[in-house]
Image (cartoon, rainbow, N blue to C red):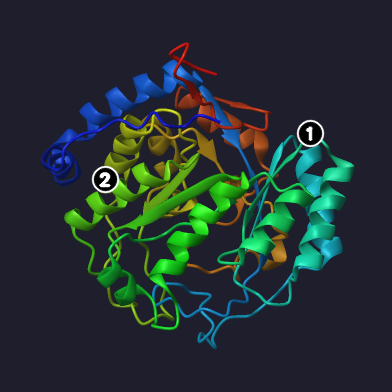
Amino acid sequence: MELKNTKYYDDQTLKRWIGDDSLNDELATRANKIRREIYGDKVYVRGLIEFSNICKNNCYYCGIRGANKNIARYRLSTEEIIATADLGYDLGYRTIVLQGGEDAYYTDDIFVSIIEEIKGHHPDIAITLSLGERSYESYKRLYIAGADRYLLREETSDKDHYYKLHPRDMSFEARRKALFNLKEIGYQVGGGFMVGSPYQTDDMIIKDLRFLQELEPAMIGIGPYLTQHDTPFRDFSNGSYRKTLRLISILRILFPYALIPSTTSLGTIDPRGREEGLKAGANVLMPNLSPTSVRESYALYDNKICTGEEAAECRACLEVRVKNAGFRIVSARGDVISYNKETRRYN
């Protein structure tokens, strides 16, 4: 798959775009034109299954960090995960995202059985994993079992900043290496970062963009940093909504081919956030397919939307909102469109 079609702009230009609130409309118009040239008005949907909120890590910004004693922990059984994926398929979702904390309970054997079972039921479905850092061998085994994509946000590409967001028992280098391992194995890889996380500067965001140009991911997920009351960062302010929209547009300009979600965090910070994210250049939505009994417990940040139109079951509601924004939801795997240098066309 040829993905080497990132656009280059100098740091001065990027810094002006990132920092200037008056450029939102201009950049969104430009980004929307690019996404329509490549993807048309299509919006791809992924049914998200948050299978466990148990995590060994203690990221300072995350509500499901291992040290948080004030959260009701859960993990879905293999049977529950497969049944939820089956429900998603019946509702028209052709990509299922399995996302959870780094929970050692789920061994490679368990994930292989889940992946093979889902693929056995639905050969035309794409499986996206978001399981955090694992060994090269683990990633490869899950890929061979049938996983198609992997989401692993680097969160920051500045080493000093990384250790302001994470404890020292986590590794800046290991996170970056994991992303390149995933790409080498053959996954459609997704990276990304928080906008407005504590201690972040615009120069750090430029580093994030440069790292993504080096990685050339198929998917790029960003969202505003949102506080969670049980974390060490409880007193920091939320990230900027407008700046996040502006960066979605910048990502579309830099990465014309990319699959860019309009995230739940955008919908949390503003009721029309996901629609505005689509207008800014995003082309993916990830409604929550998890059992309603556990949705509130996957508390990455405060006030996360998890019912009503965020629920994957409310497909018709979501389709109306997307249509009113000028786009249309399609029932398709929604694989990344690549660029062919010989024909100079996206395919």
The residue that mark 1 highlights is 124
The image shows residue 217 at horizontal and vertical percentages of 47, 42
Instruction: Name the amino acid, label 1.
Output: Asp
Decide: few, some or many residues near mark 1? Use Cα within 10 Å; few <14, some 14-19, many ≥20.
few
Q: Residue at x 32, y 33 (%)?
A: 254
168 relative position to 315: left or right: left
The image shows residue 301 at horizontal and vertical percentages of 45, 67
Q: CA distance from mark 1 to mark 2?
A: 37 Å
Instruction: Classify the position of the N terminus by image quarter.
Output: top right
Label number found at residue 244 = none
Residue 205 against residue 300 in the figure, above or below: above
Asked whether the viewer can see residue 301, the reply is no
298 relative position to 118: left or right: left
Instruction: Name the amino acid, label 2.
Output: Arg
Residue 90 against residue 35 in the figure, above or below: below
The image shows residue 225 at horizontal and vertical percentages of 35, 61
178 relative position to 34: left or right: right
Q: How many marks?
A: 2
The residue that mark 2 highlights is 242
Instruction: Classify the position of the C terminus by image quarter.
Output: top right
Quarter where residue 29 is shown: top left
241 relative position to 266: left or right: left
> In the rendered structure, which disc, 1 or 2, sits on the residue that comes first in sequence?
1
Residue 78 against residue 270 in the figure, above or below: below
Residue 5 against residue 99 in the figure, above or below: above
Q: Residue at x 67, y 63 (%)?
A: 137
Dot 1 lies on which element?
A: loop
Dot 2 lies on which element?
A: helix
